[in-house]
Image: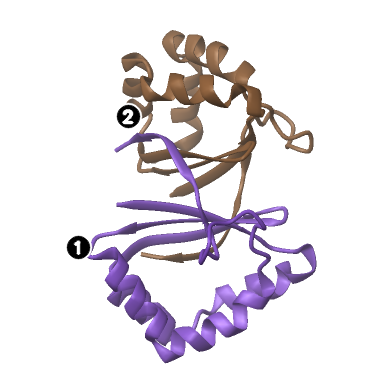
Chain colours: A brown, B purple
């Protein structure tokens, strides 16, 4: 399962966001792996962040819920979410917004 | 090697672009594979296209040049490029613009 998402990143937060992501906390990386996320990349273009990852577990909702309950991940989100600017038209409860896949070739 | 890129897609061309990409011509798919591109996805968000792929060859410039010389790929580009709207501030000679990777975890 492939997931691509986007979120805003105000220009004034770009440097801080990049700096944090150059040294993501080990506990956060471990939780990502424990939640069966693979090949996870985040890119920036202007004031937009794009993420791409693959999920290789069999219960995405449960694995994401486990991530959200992890205290170190919560501290990480408390640190980086204020740097982001979510899209106003995102779905209820969403932070990043899901992109629509229009093409794929293995 | 991972590559992520973006380009504009005017709203009025969205439907046609998606329709073409639901049935990409076999010769185009073959050339992508011959040029050592793997795990290639294209996503859309509003008026922006986001692409992600991996390159597993050992001469990216040469493999991209081979793609550009393929007659079927040229016909494909003649079909889909008019639907796209490249960013005005792209580098000389570029069509899609490269994104900057800020995070990666295998």
Dot 1 crowding, Cα within 10 Å, few <14, some 14–19, many 20+? few
Camera-side residue of A59 and B56: B56
Q: Which residue sits at x=61%, y=75%?
A: B81
- For label 1, the SS is loop
Q: Which residue sits at x=73%, y=37%?
A: A91
Image marks 1 and 2: residues in contact by CB distance under 8 Å: no
- A72 vs B88: above or below: above
Q: Do discs 1 and 2 share a chain?
A: no
Q: Is residue A69 toward the left or the right of residue A23 in the image? A: right
Q: Is residue B12 toward the left or the right of residue A54 in the image? A: right
Residue A31 at what x, y percent from top left? 36, 22
Residue mark closest to the camera, 1 vs 2: 1
- A25 vs A36: above or below: above
- B54 vs A68: above or below: below
Q: Is residue B89 toward the left or the right of residue A22 in the image? A: right
Where's the C terminus of chain A, which quadrant?
bottom left
Q: Which mark is residue A5?
A: none
Residue A99 at what x, y percent from top left? 61, 49
Dot 2 crowding, Cα within 10 Å, few <14, some 14–19, many 20+? some
* Outermost residue to the front: B92
Say which residue label 2 marks: A33
Residue A37 at what x, y percent from top left? 38, 36
Structural distance between the alpha carbons of marks 1 and 2:
29 Å
Residue A76 at what x, y percent from top left? 48, 14
Count of numbered labels shown in the rendering: 2
Residue A66, picture quadrant: top left
- For label 2, the SS is helix
Q: Which mark is residue B58?
A: 1
Q: Chain of mark 2?
A: A
* Outermost residue to the bottom: B71
- B8 vs A4: above or below: below
Q: Which residue sits at x=44%, y=21%?
A: A19
């Amino acid at each position: 399962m492939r997931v691509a998402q986007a979120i805003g990143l105000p220009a004034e937060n770009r440097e801080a966001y990049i700096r944090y992501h150059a040294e993501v906390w080990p506990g956060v990386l471990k939780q990502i792996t424990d939640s069966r996320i693979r090949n996870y990349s985040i890119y920036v273009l202007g004031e937009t962040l794009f993420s791409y990852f693959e999920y290789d577990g069999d219960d995405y909702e449960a694995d994401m819920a486990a991530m959200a309950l992890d205290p170190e991940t919560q501290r990480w989100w408390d640190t980086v979410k204020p740097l982001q600017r979510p899209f106003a038209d995102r779905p209820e409860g969403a932070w990043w917004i899901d992109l629509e896949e229009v093409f794929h070739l293995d």
